Amino acid sequence: MSFRFEGYVIVSADGMLADARHVMPDSLKFEGDKRFFEQALDRAALIVHGRHSHEGQPNSPKRKRLILTRKISALAVDPEMPNATLWNPLGASFEEASSFADVSSGTVAIIGGPVVFDMFMDRYDTFWLSEAPQVRLPGGEGCFVRVPERTPHEILAAHRMEPGDPLILDAAHEVTVTPWRRG
């Protein structure tokens, strides 16, 4: 098996990926970031996320994915989405889950939430951190388990990741995406 692991998230100025109700608000949605994200997922061999995360894009049903859940013992085909595998990491390794999903190589796109991001922290080749500095979500859900006690930057750096040059996704709202790569 040969995988490249990439994480994708957009966060508010205070490091939140969702509001206090665990919902991504419209204030955190920008066309430039949505295009960047959709193009990246179209290139991925496998998408990994928790049961509350989903990209909701036109190509979403076509994408192979692992959905983390504790409702099963190990692995199962998702009865609602034929390209999705339900995966309990306590009952099966990532390698077993990807094999069950019939994916043995390529880019694995990790799209959240916080627990899922943290599970792969030491496996990322690149973590694409999109930031919306004009948005604040007090009391929201941090992008990683230890946010807001620590910033997303501090957490990525603590895992031997280094920031590259940011790309501008929405100049009017100062939205950027920074590739954090293994140092």
Image: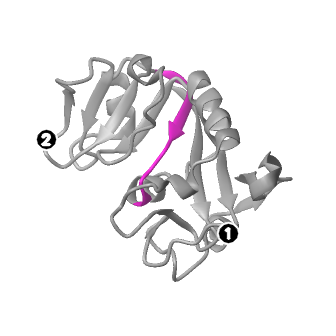
Q: Position of residue 86 (x, y in %)?
A: 24, 34
Image point 41% across, 52% down: which residue?
116
Local SS, label 1: helix
Q: Which mark is residue 153?
A: 1
Q: Position of residue 47 (x, y in %)?
A: 46, 33
Residue at which label 2 appears: 72
Closer to us: 125 or 165: 165
Q: Is residue 159 left or right of residue 56?
A: right
- Indicate yes or no whether the magenta region holds residue 105: yes
**Segment tinted magenta in the rendering:** 104-114
Q: Is residue 37 left or right of residue 179?
A: left
- Dot placed on the residue nearer the N-terminal end, 1 or 2: 2
- Residue 127 appears anywhere in the view: yes
Q: Amino acid at mark 1?
A: His
Q: Position of residue 8 (x, y in %)?
A: 58, 46
Quadrant holding the C terminus: bottom right
Q: Amino acid at mark 2?
A: Ile
Q: Mark 1 Cα within 10 Å, few/some/many (few <14, many 20+)?
A: some
